[in-house]
Image (spheres, helix red, strand yellow):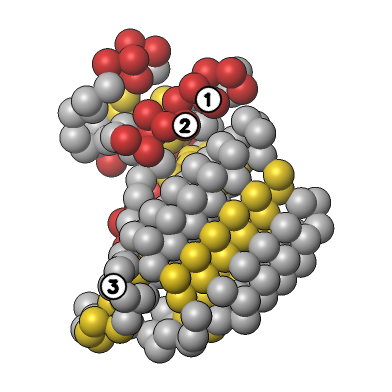
Amino acid sequence: MLIIGAGGLAAQIFPDIKTMYLPDVAFWSEYETRYPFIKESYEILTTDEQAAHYFNTVSRSFILAVGLPAVRRKMAEKFTALGGTLSTFISPVSNAVSPYAVIETGATILSHTMVEPGTTIKTGVLMNKTSNVAHGCIVGEYCELGPAVILTGEVEMGEDCYIGTGTIILPRVKMGRRCTVAAGAVIKKNIPANSLVSGGTSAIVKTIQEA
């Protein structure tokens, strides 16, 4: 398995990787890692050519250990084009992921998270530590839920949303695609696509222009 990224998120999942005894693990990063324990334990690839060779000779499986929705989507597309197969990572540490939830390919679910029955976690989603997704929620492709984010029942979230640390989204709220919510917000009403939402007042600050 090739782990894409060698920064902070990779450091977070590193202990899980060690304890899971996964075969043929390597990391890929175009930047020098700040975490010596990663490079002391595993090979770190640095070029596209090395990644393609790894997929052809070792394993086609890769997981995303990078943050930000646009970056995760870009990396998934890039390494799929190089011959890899996007895979799912779920931490084995104190997770409560219901067998009656749908976890699509490529999700990265860190430790001490909760996913309740009837929920759909779509392709490429990142659930950071202690984030909770209650019954009947839909989390769109490549969304990122920061630490301690809580989605209460039947929340629907479009693709590529970023939800900051400690945000609470109340029941049946619908959020459009490409929204960014600052840390600590409490979202009580529907949010249109491409909205930037403040943490303190939970008000829409502005509309984010499409790239």
Which percent across, then down, holds residue 205?
A: 24, 82
* Residue under the image location 77 percent in, 61 percent down: 117
- Residue 57 is left or right of residue 203, and the answer is right
Residue neighbourhood size for the residue with mark 1, other residues' Cα within 10 Å, grouped as few (<14), some (14–19), many (≥20): some
**Vertical placement of 89 versus 140: above or below?**
above
In the picture as drawn, the residue positioned furthest to the right comes out as 100
Find residue 118 and report its image quarter.
bottom right
Measured in 3D between alpha carbons, the distance from the residue under mark 1 to the one under mark 3, in whole angstroms, is: 35 Å
Q: Which residue is mark 1?
A: 17
Residue type at the position of mark 1: Ile
Q: Which mark is residue 198?
A: 3
- The answer to which of 60 and 65 lies nearer the viewer is 65
Q: Nearer the viewer, mark 1 or mark 3?
A: 3
**Vertical placement of 111 versus 190: above or below?**
above
Q: Which mark is residue 8?
A: none
Measured in 3D between alpha carbons, the distance from the residue under mark 1 to the one under mark 2, in whole angstroms, is: 6 Å
Which element type, helix, strand or loop, lies under badge 2? helix
Residue type at the position of mark 3: Ser
In the picture as drawn, the residue positioned furthest to the front comes out as 201
Q: Which mark is residue 13?
A: 2
Could you tell which of marks 2 and 3 lies nearer the N-terminus?
Answer: 2
- Residue 50 is left or right of residue 143, and the answer is left
